[in-house]
């Protein structure tokens, strides 16, 4: 079905992006070759691939910016890689990378540049947006954040009653929450332990109530983080926070300036809310929400870990950006991971990817990645607005190891679905405790080995297993994984890891020729909720014009809450 491409406003730049002459995916020569190749390879076992090449485990690896990738336990051969690299080339990946770094408006449906890479460019670099170098603007905001963080962290910034700030609550949702909360958890080791950090995102009042129940308003600073400053959840929580503060401050509205700061692109709405715009930290429409944790949206991160650590994190991001921008594709980590992901998604029909960090501090990393990957690549039309006839973004999910091993790994090992896994681990622990770390890392290596090689019926029988039990106890193996190893979870390492996945998403979006930077799919539900809210709250019986199910649910809710 052709989606109404003619209804979309075509911009000159989006036309330029299309005119890169990238044929539809199925018409790129590498696609047909990969399809034929898949028919040959789909039954080949990893046991065979490893037996055929004793150096495979050393050869199919790549290392850059302190990130070591072992991709040998994937169902690929040199020919697969060569064809995938050919696909990248035929998909114009190089041109698209250059277009992003050049500031072209590659977010075609919103006619915006995609310049999160400018957020971590070093002082002195030049990245142009509409002819203007944005790097000095980025550093001006970083300097303002650093100055503010230093004042709060040192106790120089006082609350309305003269107390120092001990609690920071970030109010935001989606990219204005998941990045900050993930980064705070990930870098907790480096945080100021005298301060408390909390994150309120859900419009469910429980989120706010539980976040503040043991806090002194006089010691609490709210960061209202919202790119648009119009998001229902965030503005509702922000208003509740203001009431909570003012009720403790006996209605003293001047307290708002001491206890509220804003991070936004929307100065007008920030001022309308009553936050002094001198206490506003800006960013720009060329930063997507899910790509914003290293912008002013990271203010809570900087308050927690301090400006120097925050800058070290940006340094890590930048190192991975430079690797992605300039390294030949055959050694380029995001490109390799992205292409191997395409192989499983579009040829093996894998529906999901499991991300399994063996690092407790990364417990929110899978949740963060869900927005990054699925809001970016959960798209059904190409840049041209044509319905795709192939699968785009897979479902990302995961939990830290070893916990996941005792819940869902059963399905990965013996279930009927193919689930490619990314195992992430660090060679040095941040909390060295006896033998813990060796045990943790042994489990990473054991899991990838078990997934790849399994255990044959003969091996199971040789252990004395009765015949009837053998099928239950065998592991067919041939289940693919990447192993991503870094040194230690430092701020720089986190930056590298996040940038790695950002560019994996970019690589895949380029192959699928989709807009990885819009998110129209979230709009319909938001609009319908706005229509339903007054229907739930109305003092008189509202005239309902939804479908019969929605009408009945609304009536039932109203009845049970005693509205009628
Ligand atoms: O609803 C999705 C979304 O627009 C995300 O893309 C974004 O990160 C989130 O909402 C929050 O938006 P804002 O920062 O404008 O409040």
Image (spheres, rainbow, N blue to C red):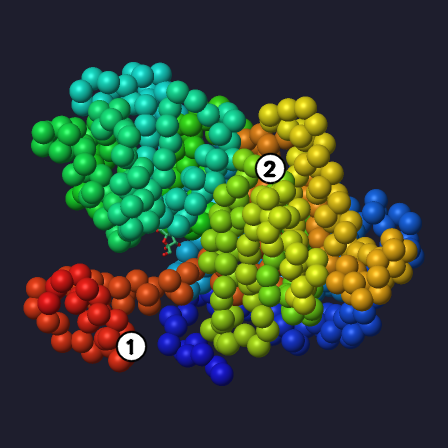
Mark 2 vs 1, N-terminal side: 2
How many dots with numbers? 2
Give the residue furthest to the left.
Answer: 540
Q: Tell me the quarter of the picture where residue 300 sits.
A: top left
Circles 2 and 1: CB distance less than 8 Å? no
Viewer-proximal residue among 452 and 384: 452
Which of the labelled discs sits on residue 359, or is there none?
Answer: 2
Name the residue at 16% across, 39% down.
Answer: 243
Quarter residue 27 falls in = bottom right
Q: Residues within 10 Å of mark 2 (few under 14, many from 20)?
A: many
Compared with 408, 270 (above or below) is above
Residue closer to the observer: 314 or 469: 469
Q: Residue at x 57, y 62 (%)?
A: 394
Task: Give the percent coordinates (x, y) of residue 534.
Answer: 16, 64
166 and 81: which one is in front? 166
Specify whether 406 is left or right of 218. Answer: right
Quadrant (top left/top right/bottom left/bottom right) for the C terminus:
bottom left
Q: Quadrant of residue 418?
A: bottom right
Residues packed near mark 1 inside 10 Å, few (<14), some (14 to 19) or many (20 plus):
few
Q: Position of residue 197 (x, y in %)?
A: 38, 31
Residue 262 visible in the current orientation: yes
User: Which element is circle 1 on?
Assistant: helix
Residue at 45% across, 63% down: 108
* Residue under label 1: 549
Q: Nearer the viewer, mark 2 or mark 1?
A: 1
Left or right, residue 405 beside residue 229: right
Q: Can I make out residue 476 in this image? A: no
Q: Position of residue 559 (x, y in %)?
A: 17, 67
Q: CA distance from mark 2 to mark 1?
A: 45 Å
């Amino acid at each position: 079905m052709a989606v109404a491409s003619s209804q979309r406003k075509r911009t000159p730049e989006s036309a330029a992006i299309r005119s890169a002459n990238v044929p539809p995916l199925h018409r790129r020569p590498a696609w047909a070759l990969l399809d034929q190749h898949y028919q040959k390879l789909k039954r080949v076992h990893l046991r065979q691939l490893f037996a055929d090449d004793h150096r495979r485990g050393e050869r199919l690896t790549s290392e850059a910016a302190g990130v070591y990738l072992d991709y040998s336990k994937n169902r690929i051969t040199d020919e697969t890689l060569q064809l995938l690299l050919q696909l990248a080339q035929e998909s114009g990946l190089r041109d698209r990378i250059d277009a992003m770094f050049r500031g072209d408006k590659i977010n075609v449906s919103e006619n915006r540049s995609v310049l999160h890479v400018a957020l971590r460019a070093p002082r002195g670099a030049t990245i142009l947006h509409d002819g203007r170098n944005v790097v000095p603007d980025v550093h001006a905001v970083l300097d303002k954040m650093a100055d503010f963080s230093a004042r709060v962290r040192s106790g120089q910034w006082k609350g309305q009653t003269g107390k120092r700030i001990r609690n920071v609550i970030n109010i935001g949702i989606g990219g204005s929450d998941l990045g900050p909360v993930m980064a705070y958890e990930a870098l907790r080791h480096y945080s100021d332990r005298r301060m408390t950090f909390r994150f309120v995102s859900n419009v469910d009042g429980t989120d706010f109530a539980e976040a503040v129940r043991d806090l002194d308003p006089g010691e609490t600073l709210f960061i209202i983080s919202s790119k648009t400053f119009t998001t229902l959840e965030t503005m509702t929580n922000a208003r509740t926070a203001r009431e909570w503060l003012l009720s403790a401050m006996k209605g003293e509205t001047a307290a708002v300036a001491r206890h509220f700061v804003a991070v936004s692109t929307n100065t007008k709405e920030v001022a309308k809310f009553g936050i002094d715009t001198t206490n506003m930290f800006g960013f720009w429409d060329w930063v997507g929400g899910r790509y914003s944790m290293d912008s002013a949206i990271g203010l809570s991160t900087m308050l927690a870990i301090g400006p120097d650590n925050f800058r070290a994190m940006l340094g890590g991001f930048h190192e991975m950006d430079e690797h992605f921008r300039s390294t030949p594709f055959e050694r380029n980590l995001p490109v390799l991971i992205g292409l191997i992901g395409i192989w499983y998604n579009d040829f093996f029909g894998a529906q999901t990817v499991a991300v399994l960090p063996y690092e407790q501090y990364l417990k929110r990393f899978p949740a963060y990645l869900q927005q990054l990957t699925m809001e970016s690549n959960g798209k059904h039309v190409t840049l041209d607005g044509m319905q795709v006839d192939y699968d785009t973004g897979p479902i990302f999910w995961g939990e830290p190891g070893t916990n996941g091993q005792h819940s869902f790994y059963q399905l990965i090992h013996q279930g009927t679905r193919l689930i490619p896994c990314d195992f992430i681990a660090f060679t040095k622990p941040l909390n060295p405790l006896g033998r813990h770390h060796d045990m943790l890392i042994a489990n990473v290596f054991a899991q990838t080995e078990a997934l790849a090689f399994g255990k044959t019926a003969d091996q199971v029988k040789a252990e004395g297993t009765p015949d009837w039990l053998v099928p239950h106890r065998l592991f067919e193996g041939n289940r693919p994984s990447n192993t991503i190893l870094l040194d230690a979870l430092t701020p720089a390492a986190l930056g590298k890891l996040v940038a790695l996945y950002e560019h994996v998403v970019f690589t895949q979006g380029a192959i699928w020729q989709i807009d990885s930077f819009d998110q129209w799919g979230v709009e319909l539900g938001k609009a319908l909720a706005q229509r339903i809210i007054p229907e739930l709250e109305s003092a008189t019986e509202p005239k309902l014009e939804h479908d019969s199910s929605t009408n009945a649910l609304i009536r039932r809710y109203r009845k049970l809450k005693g509205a009628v």
